[in-house]
Amino acid sequence: MKLITSLVGIAALSFVTSALAQEEETPSPAPEEKASATVEETPTSTPEAKTATTPREQPAAQKKEKAAAAAPQKAPSPVAAAPGKKMSAEATLKDNENRWSAAIAKHDTATIESMVAADFIGVSSKGKVQNRRAMLADVKGDKDTYTSTKAEKLAVHMYGSGVAVVVGMANEKGSGKDGKAFDRTYRFTDTWMGRGGNWQCIASQAMELRK
């Protein structure tokens, strides 16, 4: 009986020893990592984060500076020159008569041609009826030398907004092709019409005043 008990005890001891050995050899599972224990806290601020501010934190002045820098820079527009004062019809017509007289002294047919209508009709101081071509031919063929030509005592009479009659006097001083000096004065009437934004002389009549 004692022998059986001893054998049972030995067997039980061997079983326990074997079980303990297995427990030591079997690795125990690693404990689960808790997020709260393993996650490192991110620092609330870094040197870079301190220097960079959010749009809400930026002062208004900084916002304006950034907006101005982001916007495309426009080249400064040149300062527009002040437009000249528009001449009245009366002033324009008087200026035309003065330029016409000056053009006669220079035998400048181009200036006169620019002011005379294509359908112009006129009566010269010698009583000759002339169209535009004939009148310009007389100016071009004139052999007199002028020292002074001027329009005087100009009076402008408006008929509506597009027709005007200018009455005045023209004085011419100089010498003829024969060398003789002359001092001539004419009374003239010019009729002007507004066409295409310009005044054109459509009719003219002149008469030399005898002294």
Image (cartoon, rainbow, N blue to C red):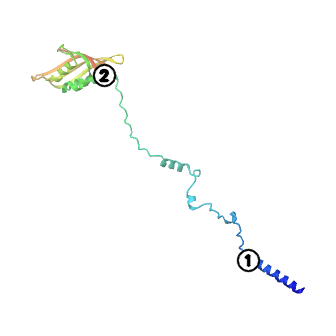
- Compare residues 211 and 45 and report the one nearer the observer: 45
Quadrant position of the N terminus in the picture? bottom right
Q: Residue at x 70, y 64 (%)?
A: 34
| Amino acid under disc 2 | Trp
Which residue in the structure is indicated by mark 1?
A: 24
Disc 1 secondary structure class? helix
> Would residue 25 be seen by someone viewing this image from the given angle?
yes
Q: Is residue 162 left or right of residue 66?
A: left
Which residue in the structure is indicated by mark 2?
A: 199
| Amino acid under disc 1 | Glu
- Residue 42, how many percent across, how many down? 63, 62
- Compare residues 7 and 100 and report the one nearer the observer: 7
- Residue 64, how many percent across, how many down? 52, 47
Quadrant position of the C terminus in the picture? top left
- Residue 71, how many percent across, how many down? 48, 46
Q: Quadrant of residue 18?
A: bottom right
- Compare residues 121 and 164 and report the one nearer the observer: 121
Q: Residue at x 80, y 79 (%)?
A: 15
In the orientation shown, which residue stands out farthest toward the left? 178
Of the numbered discs 1 and 2, the one sitting upstream in the chain is 1
- Position of residue 23 relative to residue 67, above or below, is below
Near mark 1 (Cα within 10 A), the count class, few <14, some 14-19 or many ≥20, is few
Q: Is residue 111 left or right of residue 57?
A: left
Q: Residue at x 74, y 76 (%)?
A: 22
Q: Quadrant of residue 193?
A: top left
- Position of residue 81 relative to residue 98, above or below, is below
Disc 2 secondary structure class? strand
